[in-house]
Amino acid sequence: MRFLTFDALDSTNAEAVRQAQAGADLPLWIMAKSQSSGRGRRGREWVSESGNLFCTGVYPKSDNAQHDAQKSFVAALAIYDSLTDYVDPSLLNIKWPNDVRLGGKKVSGILLERTSEALCIGIGINLLTAPKNVTDQETACVIDYIEEALINDPEPILDMPEPVLAILARNYSQWSRRHDEEGFAPIRKAWLLRAAGIGQRVRVNLAKESFTGYADGLNEDGALTVRLDSGAYRDIHAGEIFFEGS
């Protein structure tokens, strides 16, 4: 596993594409201390405040686009498991498809991009600060959920992003290897154990329609199954999910 750290980049995903196009040895993890053009899902800006983690894992892509798309669930599991090194696991959950939440608030984001050269898994984690009014969800940062004694220790548990990246890369590799060897079933099972809102009432916003129902589970290809008030079921492959009342 190789790591490249930059003081500043436009975005780690953009650098990942450049590295892959240049024939870099993969896998590779790229981290930036600052980003000028961080990106989230659906073309949204990812606000890159100092002290937070901005990174991208660059891996060889497979011949199966659906398999590669499922790596977003792999990444969510890796983030969740990495944060248990710092905070109480009972405070963590995953909101479909891959938003890891801390204390009921969004603490990380994932941007998966499959290019002609590689699979780029962009990850942002709010470690020290939580950007405000930049997303449709409330945001959290990890340091606010760590015991004060651990923060003020002569060797503080969280004072820079590099150790978090090392833990994240290890966890991603372990989950990704299992996904490659055993398929989506163990990923789906682990995701459901960490999931938020299964069984709860949700509002679904799609490109051309909105509707409500109950989050019923995750199907075999990663779609969220929603039970409508009529009793019918719909599989949601792409869209925005909101818990009713949030």
Image (spheres, rainbow, N blue to C red):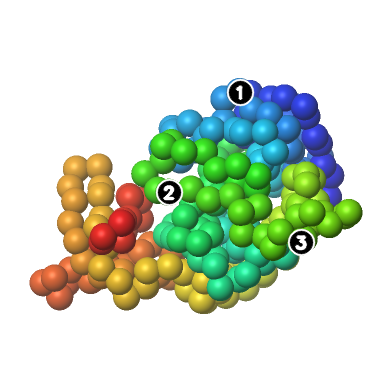
In this view of the protein, which residue sits in the foreground, 213 or 131? 131
Looking at the picture, does residue 204 appear above or below residue 85? Answer: above
Mark 2 or mark 3, whichever is nearer to me: 3
Q: Nearer the viewer, residue 179 or 35?
A: 35
Q: Position of residue 168 (x, y in %)?
A: 72, 55
* Residue 158 to residue 235: above or below: above
Per the rendering, the mark at residue 138 is 2
Q: Amino acid at mark 2?
A: Glu
Distance between the Cα atoms at labels 2 and 3? 26 Å
Closer to viewer: mark 1 or mark 2? 2
What kind of residue is marked 3?
Ala
Disc 1 crowd, CA 10 A, few/some/many (<14, 14-19, 20+): few
- Disc on the earlier residue, 1 or 3: 1
* Residue ID at (32%, 75%): 199
Question: Could you tell me which residue is drawn at 65 percent across and 44 percent down?
Answer: 128
Percent position (x, y) of residue 10?
63, 23
* The quarter of the displayed image where residue 88 is located: bottom right
Label 3 sits on residue: 149
Which mark identifies residue 36?
1
Q: Residue furthest left?
A: 230
Say which quadrant the C terminus sits in: bottom left
Is disc 1 in contact with disc 2, using a CB cutoff of under 8 Å? no
Q: Can the viewer see residue 175 in this picture?
A: no
Q: Relative to the observer, which residue lies in front, 145 or 237?
A: 145
Give the percent coordinates (x, y) of residue 23.
Answer: 77, 32
Tell me the residue at 59%/50% (across/down).
Answer: 141
Query: Which corner quadrant of the image does residue 89 belong to?
Result: bottom right
Q: Is residue 80 left or right of residue 132?
A: right
